[in-house]
Image: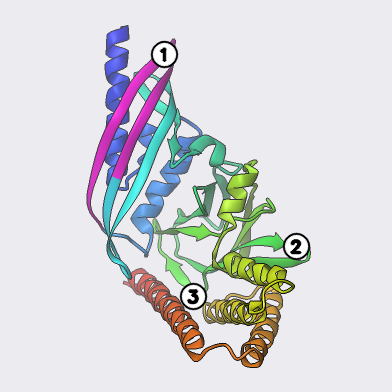
Amino acid sequence: MGATEDRQAIEAVIREFLDSAARAKFPPGFWAEPLSDAFAVGTAIGRSTPAKLPVLSGSAHVRKLEIRSIEGDSANVELNAECVTKVDHPIGGHRHIRRVYSGGVLLRREGEQWRIITLKQDGVDFAAATFQPVVARAEIDGVDLSLTTRYGKADWFMGLLFENHSSESAILDRVRSTQKVWWLFEDGVVVRHTPLVLRNGGSWGLVQELKGRMLLRPISVTARVNGRDIGLEVSPPRIPLLRRIRQSVHPNTMLHAFVLTALLLLPIASRAPGALGLALVSAGVFNIASEVLAALRASRFSAQLLYGIVGVIELGVGAFLVWHERVSTITVVGLLLVVAYWLWLQFRNLELWRKAQAETVRDAAT
């Protein structure tokens, strides 16, 4: 190819990628290795996941697409674009998801095609954000397990795929991911707890959103196939400290930040004990409810007992302070309404999760 043909081909690849991203599709053909392997797993998960998110429409808006350089089989492009995807969320209804692509895009020519080595989505470089190995694989009784994980702007995303290549059906049972917490406890997510029959050529997978953590520790995934255990592990890359702090800011962290703030104000603010009581009640309810919901999802992790005990203590101390400081009824009622609304959302999520599990089993049995 000549210089003009290369520029046209590179621009076409990037525009096609943006149009595809606006429809929430990331086929592996746009990507160079090793990310192409990760997106191949993601595409296969999209075909087999029980938790689909219908895409209603999508649009890509390109503000800047400038080819900086082409040297042999490598190219560097400056990109500034936004993709807007309209989805039908099971709880929130119609929602718009925005993805911003800005900064440098690296490409490599493979054969006659230009493919993306890496780019930044919402300020996160795909190649730098991917856990190692890019795709971890294991096999047992003809069933292949593939695991790929990366971090995003605020969370971690884990893709799991089970494929049955044997001539007989296989039973997939209890899939979970775990991480160490404070060197002593284990925390994680039960991805699947009901048995599923994978017929010959069948597959099952999903993308699980995980909480980001300050302490970077490997993620372990274990599953049981035909009564035998199989496991994989991936290690996080080096994540900048500020991003780790941002990823760690989930509701539990924010509530305990309010608790700490109220504690620091105790010597100088007369109403700080009442505020501390409200913060402790909120944090305690959150901890207790989170562990009850985890138990209803059949999660069993050693950190649950720690979180539950802390929640009970916080709720008890907070309720005493609220009573002792005579916090106004309107304030207490307002807090209870917020807590009730949050609990309602969580239990609705639980019902959707159970429905997805039931539909998966029913589909597999047909």
Which amino acid does the dot numbered 2 rest on?
Trp
Query: How many numbered dots are placed on residues in this image?
Result: 3
Label 2 sits on residue: 182
Indicate whether 68 appears above or below 144.
above
Packing grade of label 3 (10 A; few <14, some 14-19, many >=20) is some
Task: Kindly indicate whether the residue at mark 2 contacts the one at mark 3 (C-beta within 8 angstroms).
Answer: no
Mark with earlier residue (3, 2): 2
Which amino acid does the dot numbered 1 rest on?
Ser
Packing grade of label 2 (10 A; few <14, some 14-19, many >=20) is few
Label 3 sits on residue: 194
Residue 215, horizontal then vertical, whole percent: 69, 53
Indicate whether 287 appears above or below 316.
above
Indicate whether 81 appears above or below 296.
above
The chief SS type of the magenta part is strand
Looking at the rendering, the stretch of residues picked out in magenta corresponds to 55-83
- Residue 71 in magenta stretch: yes
**Would you say 63 lies left or right of 245 here?**
left
Mark with earlier residue (1, 2): 1
Q: Quadrant of the N terminus?
A: top left
Viewer-side residue, 202 vs 305: 305
Residue 99, horizontal then vertical, whole percent: 36, 44
SS under mark 3: loop
Label 1 sits on residue: 69
Q: Looking at the rendering, which quadrant does residue 357 occupy?
A: bottom left
Residue 1 visible in image: no
- Residue 11 in magenta stretch: no
Mark with earlier residue (3, 1): 1
Report the residue at 44% width, 10% height from top: 72
Which amino acid does the dot numbered 3 rest on?
Thr
The Cα–Cα distance between marks 3 and 1, rounded to whole angstroms, is 53 Å
